[in-house]
Amino acid sequence: MVKKGLIVAFSMFALVSIGFASGDKSISEEELGLRKTSIHDESNVKPVEFSYSKDAPGTSKRIERAYMNAPPMIPHSVDGLLPITRENNQCLSCHMPEVAKSMGATPIPPSHFINFRPDTKMKDGKVIKEGKVVGEDIKNTSDIKLAKVKKLNGLYQGRFNCSQCHAPQANVKPLVENSFTPDFKDDKLKGKSNLVDVINEGVDIE
Ligand code: HEC
Ligand code: HEC
């Protein structure tokens, strides 16, 4: 009778040998890239056909958030809305909190009305935060701890370019599947954010 341990040892040997055998097979240049075509010649490369959502704002279906407090992706068409400039931002005409409800749109959240960056200056090797010297011989202002949160009267202009974080979505199949599954603390957060309430979670502010 063959002992169990021996069978395991033998199968492991077999697996290792198969591993080595397949390791010998070289990969051709056509197989190498995601395009599956020669990496030296682009003349026959055609981009995959795709289209963005054509549903007008008000007729599209919201997309589940990628993870808790992820920026929601834009479910509706952005035809005629881009590019966004500081002077001309049509997103605001439907998403500013005072109008959003009547438009059926999600209001821009409180986090976008706050400047989280510390008001910090460097002078003669000293770091001055909100008028006070908070450090000497500091090389880099990013070493300084978190800002005091300042609520602004209007949208924080560091956020004016909405599509920097919120992107319209196209109907393409990803070339590499993403197997990430998000974990939401609360099912409600699949469709809304609460970043401002939890912004200091796990942060030790002096
Ligand atoms: C004409 C009004 C209107 C304009 C302009 C508009 N939106 Fe919307 N937006 C909506 C509505 C309404 C929804 C909800 C989905 C729907 O009903 O189509 C929505 C949904 C969204 C969502 C998803 C929110 C969520 O809860 O998942 C994002 C993000 C968004 N819009 C961003 C933008 C950006 C960025 C712009 C500017 C490029 C913009 N929207 C311009 C009306 C508008
Ligand atoms: C720097 C990245 C960034 C920019 C720029 C930005 N957002 Fe967001 N947005 C986020 C993130 C992250 C969230 C989710 C967490 C939160 O509430 O801040 C969010 C959430 C939202 C939501 C969902 C609110 C909710 O209650 O669930 C809306 C609507 C939205 N943003 C609209 C906008 C619009 C309109 C602009 C342009 C004026 C904009 N955002 C600019 C990152 C950004």
Image (cartoon, helix red, strand yellow):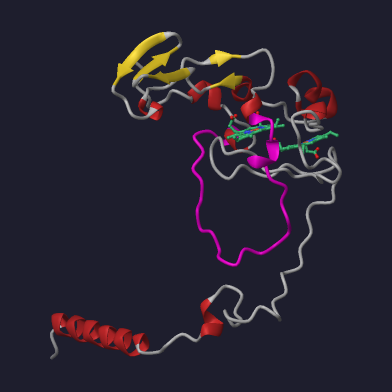
Q: Is residue 181 magenta?
A: yes
Stretch of the chain drawn in magenta: 159-188
What predominant SS class does the magenta segment belong to? loop
Residue sitting at x 28%, y 84%: 15
The image quarter in which residue 123 lies: top left
User: Which percent across, then down, holds residue 53?
Assistant: 79, 51
Determine the residue located farthest toward the top in the rendered image: 131
Left or right of 161 on screen, residue 185: left
Residue sitting at x 76%, y 63%: 50
Residue 63 sits above or below residue 134 on the image: below
Residue sitting at x 34%, y 14%: 134
Q: Locate ligand 2 by image quadrant.
A: top right
Q: Is residue 69 magenta?
A: no
The image quarter in which residue 84 lies: top right
Left or right of 188 on screen, residue 4: left
Nearer to me, 38 or 26: 38
Residue 15 sits above or below residue 137 on the image: below
